[in-house]
Structure formats: structure tokens, C-alpha cells
Image: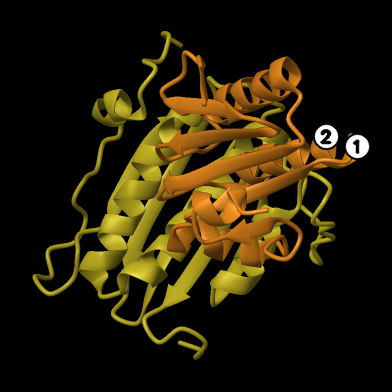
Amino acid sequence: MEAMAGKADATMSKVEPQSERSAPQRPAALKLRVTSDPAFLAPVRRSVEHFSGQAGLDVKAAGELGLCVNEAMANVTRHAYGGATDKPVEVDVDFDGEAVRVRLRDWGHGHEPPTEPKHDPLKPGGIGLVCLKQLLDGFEFTKLPDGMRLTMKRNLNHGRAS
Amino acid sequence: MNPLKTDSELVPSARKEGQFVIAALCGEIDLHNSPELRHVILTLMQQNAPQRLVLNLMQVPYMDSSAVAVLVEALQKMRKVGGKIFLTNLQPRVQGLLEIARLSSVFTIVLDEPEALTP
């Protein structure tokens, strides 16, 4: 992979949103194809937050979903890819009228994280899963033959099932 | 007041006042740039051996868990030498993450620099 620019903004050209849906009242689905380089964390997070705002999430809710995506992507780089920064990551975002869903796909080792996060505030690690548990209305790890897919859901009416 | 050089856009200004080192952080901090933040903060601590480290987060609208890990590492190093770390001017998203990480009561969080510097 070519060397990344120092500023995350410089990587935006490598994020390729594509329209999938034409319903005028809903934001078009996003397909973001990036690598596991942490330089992509900020542009992907901002894209998800912008999409979530268009879908109707308020600024705080959109930011919380963005944080979850940030943490999940960082865990893909750190754990699924063992720190490698040139591996593929796909982020698909859509809105069904009730919830924003983010699907994060990697082709790493496919190990599912523990269901119950064990987080000691003074030890590194574990905050990402705590974020998923506290800030989302649902998330699911799906083990695939060649990696993992994490689906994250945030309802417009946070806390209610959709 | 003694200005300190950091050579990092993440910590554009720092100074030493007696036992205090006061550093202003700037920008969104995630796994991409948190290693740089770690280097700058640990270098400031190593070179100046402060008893009180004040990190002004007014210009930090966002950080992720990797940045929080840097703050925790700094906290633990300060505790080892009997020192203390203050976080000031927290922005809502940073405050929220510290609460999620159950760290808002672990750090000494104050409103602003003058409050941190008050004996």
C-alpha cells in the first residue's frame, strides 16, 4: 500500500461513497472501501456521523455511533489484522426508516471478542466493547469463512427495539 | 513561566510553572495520532519531572480509547512519583467517553487552568 499522508483529511479521496438507494426522504446507503490504516478512522467516522445526521439522529447520537465505528475499526486493525495497516475493510451504512445500521467487514483471523466485556478502567483495552454495549441498540458479530462481519444498529428512538 | 517546546501540532503549547507542567492539546485524537500524543506527553514528563501535570483539552473535540489509554498511562506514571494529573476544559464528547470508560472519577477533572493551579 502506498504511504498514507499525515493528515486524515488527505485520505478522503480513498473513501468512495456510492449511492444504492433513491428514496428521497432517506440518505443513500454508503459503501466505504478502505484499508486497516488508522488514517481512515477519522474520515470514515465523519462519514458515518454525517449519514446518521441525515437519517435523523441528533448530533449526540450520531457522534456516539461514530465513536462505536471508530472503536470497532481500530479493533479490526489491532486484533483481527494484528496491527497490519494494508488490509481491506468494508463499511456499509444504511437506514431503514427506524435505525441506522453499520456493517463492518474484515478478512482477519475471525476470532470473536468476548460477549461480556471485561473492562478495568486502569488497564488498556476493553473500552470499545463497552461502547458497543452502552451506546448501541444492538450489535452482532458474524463469523465468516474468511473473516468477520460486525453489524451495529442505532435506533432513531434509542433504547426502543425496532 | 517557562515555555516548553514540543514540535507537535497535537500539543501546540506547553509551559512550566514551578512544580506544574501545563500543556494544551489540540485536535481530534484517535489511533492514527495517539502514538504521537503519547510520545509528546511522556517526553514532557521525563524532561520536566512535574509534580502536577495539567492537560488543557479545550481544543480537543474528540478522542477515542487509544487517546484515553495515553491519559491513563500518564496518570499511572504521575502516581508512581506521587504526582497528580489534572484535565481541564473537557468538551462533551471527551467527557462522555471518560464516563463510559469509568474514568471520570479517576482523573482530577477541573473547569479550567486557573482552578488546576489553585493551591
| Relative depth, front residue between A48 and A105 | A48
Above or below for B17 versus A66: above
> Circle 2 marks a residue in which chain?
B
Q: Considering the numbered disc 2 on the image, is that residue within a helix, a strand or a loop?
A: helix
Callout 2 crowding tier (Cα within 10 Å): few <14, some 14–19, many ≥20: some
> Circle 1 marks a residue in which chain?
B
Residue plotted at (44% across, 58% down) = B91
Marks 1 and 2 sit apart, C-alpha to C-alpha, by 5 Å
Mark 2: amino acid: Lys
Mark 1: amino acid: Lys
Read off the residue under disc 2: B77
Residue A68 in view in this figure: no
Q: Which mark is residue B80?
A: 1
Quadrant position of the C terminus of chain A in the picture: bottom left
Image coordinates of residue B86 in percent, x first then y, are 65, 49
Marks 1 & 2 on one chain? yes
Residue plotted at (37% across, 65% down) = A62
Image coordinates of residue A133 in percent, x first then y, are 65, 70
Image coordinates of residue B95 in percent, x first then y, are 54, 62
A17 sits left or right of A134 in the view: left
| Relative depth, front residue between A65 and B38 | B38
Find chain A in the image and tell me its colour.
yellow
